[in-house]
Amino acid sequence: MTDPKSSRRTGGRAARVAKRAVPVAVNPAAPGQRGGQYQPLSPADCHKIYDTALRLLSDLGMGEVPARLWDDLIAAGCTDLCNSRIGMPRTLIENIIDKAAKTFPLHGRDPNRTIEVGGDNVFFGTGGAAVTTLDRDTGVYRPSTLTDLHDFTRLQDALDNVAWFTRCCIATDVPDMFDLDVNTAYALMRGTTKPVATAFTIADHVDPIVHLLDIAAGGTGQFARRPFLKTHISPVISPMRFGEDAVDVVYKCIEHNIPMSCITAAQAGATAPATLAGFLAQSLAETLASLVMVNVISPGFPMIFSNWPLVIDLRSGAFAGGGGETTVLNAASAQMSNWLGLPSGVAASMTDAKALDAQYGVEKGMTSLAAALAGGNLIYESSGMTASLLGASFEAFVLDDEMHSMTYRTLRGIEVSDENLGYDAICAAILGDGHFLGSDHTYQAMERDYHYPSLADREQPQTWADAGAQTAWDRAKLRVDDILATHKPTHLSAKQDAEIRAAFNIIG
């Protein structure tokens, strides 16, 4: 056993205090921690849901199939069920699942920000198409603007725990759809080097926007070689039919090697069964239909299996982004995707709260933690979204970033080793000073194992009162003010910016 006297602290108290006050440089639980600990479904449940989904696809099939896709699916072995519905045989689906992309990178323009999707890696990011922004001055919602989108982009660029950024709001002050898609892509290029995502209104917008992305990538064809933008597409419309415009976008994005999240967004009791098991079966079938479509067009193409179970309040028909049903459904969706070995995308942290209040905290904390514990590879909508996805908030972004750090720390779990068990350190403390403060064992753990919140308040009540009795919202406002005042990235060179502006109607 180590000599207790040799393990005692040395040096003065002031030196020890100064040492502990130095900020920890290493994030103890960075994005990409491992999920999968929470499994709301038993193996038998997974098999029953999966079997029902395959039966729906083979016997009921998909409707409203665009002609081009119909021909491609029939050539791949799908069947004409009559009544303009196409069946997808079980053997075909299972063959496609086996050969589908299981892991792939989502590139950042900065290679250090690239993330690997799939397996049991968990990453929080954004999504949504909020049409209102919680105004930072008035505290009430107003229509979202292009300036908001630029500010949201550079705000999250400074947040370590937001792993990728999808445009979180619609610039309602840009009425032309082409200008909207172009200026959205421009905001993403200018404001961040993380992996980004957007949506294309129609397929005709893809070619010119790829030209913009090529300029940002350094030349013609460079974007497709290392695509740093993915697209969000909903090619399947619940219940069980394709959407022609979105399918056209799928073909065009595959042509340009743009990775995609194919999102199914059925609503329980409206466009899918109200029973949770029935909902999961139909929603799984619909997302599998997207997987079949993508892999028939281009085998092995990078697609995130984005099966988003959404809930409505059956009393009123209003969308409900929080609550226990959303919590368990999205966790079960992540579990099912992982069970199939497919890169999973789910939606969480979609609070119905309008203010940053207790409802906000409960709904975001429950849904995002469950989705992460279940192993959702990409957890969308998890940063900055409020008001049932109708709103986005700057303050919410920084509060959610801190929430994600706590979730990542939870996922990291507890490492059990001889060193961490600390037998010698326990003996040294008990036979020595009688406590663990300031010991090397404690200091090493402090740097390696603990996350220290920057917004949550841990002061004594009187200290908190003397400092102004600030709420979490107050502290978040100050953090947003600081980031937006100091973090003003221009991730496009002057030459790139000028070339983009010469080719497109860049507003502002």
Image: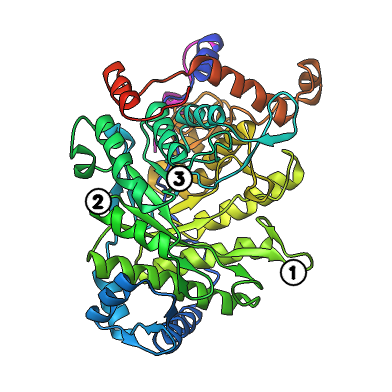
Q: Amino acid at mark 3?
A: Leu
Residue on which disc 2 sits: 257
Q: Residue 454: in sight, yes or no? A: yes
Question: Of residues 102 and 181, which is closer to you in this image?
Answer: 181
Asked if residue 196 is positioned above or below residue 240 in the image, the reply reads above
Q: Is residue 80 left or right of residue 178?
A: left
Residue on which disc 1 sits: 314
Circle 2 or circle 1, nearest the eye: 2
Percent of width and height locating residue 63: 45, 78
Q: Is residue 99 left or right of residue 152?
A: left
Q: Amino acid at mark 1?
A: Leu
Q: Point out the image quarter for the N terminus.
A: top left
State which region is magenta: 1-12
Percent of width and height locating residue 154: 47, 27
The kind of secondary structure the magenta stretch mainly shows is loop
| Number of the label disc, if any, that sits on residue 421 | 3
Question: Of residues 410 and 372, which is closer to you in this image?
Answer: 372
Q: Residue 305: in sight, yes or no? A: no
- Magenta region includes residue 450: no
Q: Secondary structure at mark 1?
A: loop
Mark 1 nearby-residue class (10 Å; few <14, some 14–19, many ≥20) = few
* Residue at the spot 54% in from the left edge and 46% down from the top edge: 407
Mark 2 nearby-residue class (10 Å; few <14, some 14–19, many ≥20) = some
- N-terminal of the two: label 2 or label 3? 2
* Residue at the spot 30% in from the left edge and 34% down from the top edge: 212
Mark 3 nearby-residue class (10 Å; few <14, some 14–19, many ≥20) = few
Asked if residue 40 is positioned above or below residue 260 in the image, the reply reads below
